[in-house]
Image (cartoon, rainbow, N blue to C red):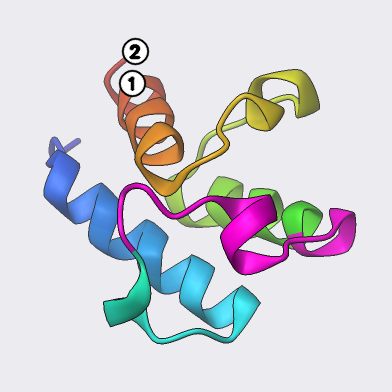
Amino acid sequence: MTMVTRTEVEKKFKQIVADIFKVPVKNLKGSTRFAEDLKAKSLGMISLVAATENTFGIKTTTAETSKNTTIKKAVDYIYKKLKG
């Protein structure tokens, strides 16, 4: 298995976020908050979690996911799961 870099994780994850929340990738920053900045509702977050799990081949829980309030936190979490 090839190790994926944090930059690759961030790029892929931002693309998923952009697709689900209909925003340009260039508008997404590490500090972008799902609820406040993207107006994410529960259905959007469920879609995001499902797409993230499918794309990266990881499993997560609602409790773990809810802690990831920004793109940076989510990318850090995904990267840690992939390394772990």
Label 1 to label 2, Cα distance in Å? 6 Å
Q: On the picture, is 16 further left or further right than 43?
A: left
Name the spot of residue 66 as percent of width and height, x first.
70, 30
Q: Residues within 10 Å of mark 1 (few under 14, many from 20)?
A: few
Q: Residue at x 27, y 20 (%)?
A: 83
Please state the horizontal and vertical placement of residue 42, each as a whole percent of the image: 87, 54
Magenta-colored stretch includes residue 32? yes
Where's the N terminus, which quadrant?
top left
- Quadrant for residue 84, please give it: top left
Residue at the location (76% across, 19% down)?
63
Residue 13's place in the image compared with 56, above or below, is below
Q: Amino acid at mark 1?
A: Lys
Along the line of sight, which residue is nearer the eye, 28 or 37?
37
Q: Is residue 72 above or below residue 21?
A: above
- Give neighbour class at mark 2: few <14, some 14-19, many 20+ (Cα, 10 Å): few
25 within the magenta span: no
From the viewer's side, name the closer residue of 21 and 27. Answer: 27
* Magenta extent: 29-44
| Residue type (three-letter) at the residue carrying disc 2 | Gly
x then y, percent, for residue 13: 39, 58
In the image, is 36 to the left or to the right of 80? right
The image quadrant that residue 62 belongs to is top right
Determine which residue is flagged by label 1: 80
Residue placed under numbered mark 2 in the picture: 84
Helix, strand or loop status at disc 1? helix
Q: Are marks 1 and 2 in contact (CB under 8 Å)?
A: yes
1 or 2: mark nearer the eye: 1
Q: Nearer the viewer, residue 5 or 28?
A: 28
